[in-house]
Image (cartoon, rainbow, N blue to C red):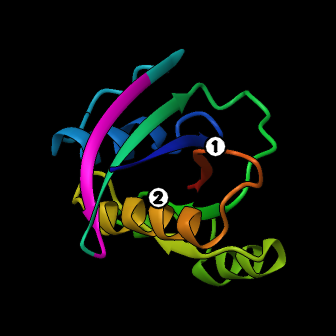
């Protein structure tokens, strides 16, 4: 079974913890409680291969130099409060050379697919000279 280390990055309040908790436990956190740093572990199957994800949910202030990246527009259920349009997110992802996905932790829209894509990206572009791979999921609101 392959192990993957995932770091979830983004500004405060964009839904990093909500996405992570929805994926790991299947529940939505209504109350916003600023994260200091949390660690989660979940076994999943991606393309018929068992995998273990070790997910570090950050406070959003850290700087990491990890690749590959998946750019995420979260809170898609709040269409009227959108701060980043799909075209802006897609354009930024194209500039960064990474996939762009829109999610909602509240309605569980594309949450499982996001973490599956993270594993696929790590399989596609592993870090050199490492036995494990890393991926950052950057979240936009």
Q: Which mark is residue 53?
A: none
Instruction: Report the side of 116 relative to 102 (left or right).
Output: left
Residue 46 painted magenta: yes
The residue at 72%/27% (across/down) is 61
Q: Position of residue 37 (x, y in %)?
A: 52, 19
Q: Nearer the viewer, residue 12 or 96?
A: 96
Q: Nearer the viewer, residue 17 or 99?
A: 99
Q: Position of residue 66 (x, y in %)?
A: 74, 47
Which residue position holds label 2?
Answer: 74
The residue at 46%/70% (across/down) is 102
Secondary structure under tag 1 reads strand
Magenta highlight range: 39-47
Instruction: Report the side of 47 relative to 10 (left or right).
Output: left
Q: Nearer the viewer, residue 30 or 113?
A: 113
The residue at 57%/40% (across/down) is 7
Q: Main secondary structure of the magenta part?
A: strand
Using the numbered discs, state the Cα–Cα distance from disc 2 to disc 1 in whole angstroms.
10 Å
Q: Hey, which quadrant is residue 10 in on the image?
A: top right
Q: Position of residue 8 (x, y in %)?
A: 55, 42
On-image quarter of the C terminus: bottom right
Which residue position holds label 1?
Answer: 10
Q: Position of residue 97 (x, y in %)?
A: 77, 77
Answer whether labels 2 and 1 touch (C-beta < 8 Å): yes
């Amino acid at each position: 079974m392959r192990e993957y280390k995932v770091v979830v990055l983004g500004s405060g309040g964009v839904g990093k913890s909500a996405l992570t908790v929805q994926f790991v436990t299947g529940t939505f956190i209504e109350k916003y409680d600023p994260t200091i740093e949390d660690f989660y572990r979940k076994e999943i199957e991606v393309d018929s291969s068992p995998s273990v994800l070790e997910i570090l949910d950050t406070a959003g202030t850290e700087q990491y130099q990890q690749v590959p990246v998946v750019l995420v527009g979260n809170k898609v259920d709040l269409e009227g409060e959108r701060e980043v349009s799909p075209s802006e997110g897609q354009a930024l992802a194209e500039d960064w050379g990474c996939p762009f996905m829109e999610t909602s932790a509240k309605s569980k829209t594309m949450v499982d697919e996001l973490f599956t894509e993270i594993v696929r990206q790590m399989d596609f572009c592993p870090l050199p000279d490492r036995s494990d791979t890393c991926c950052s999921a950057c979240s936009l609101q």
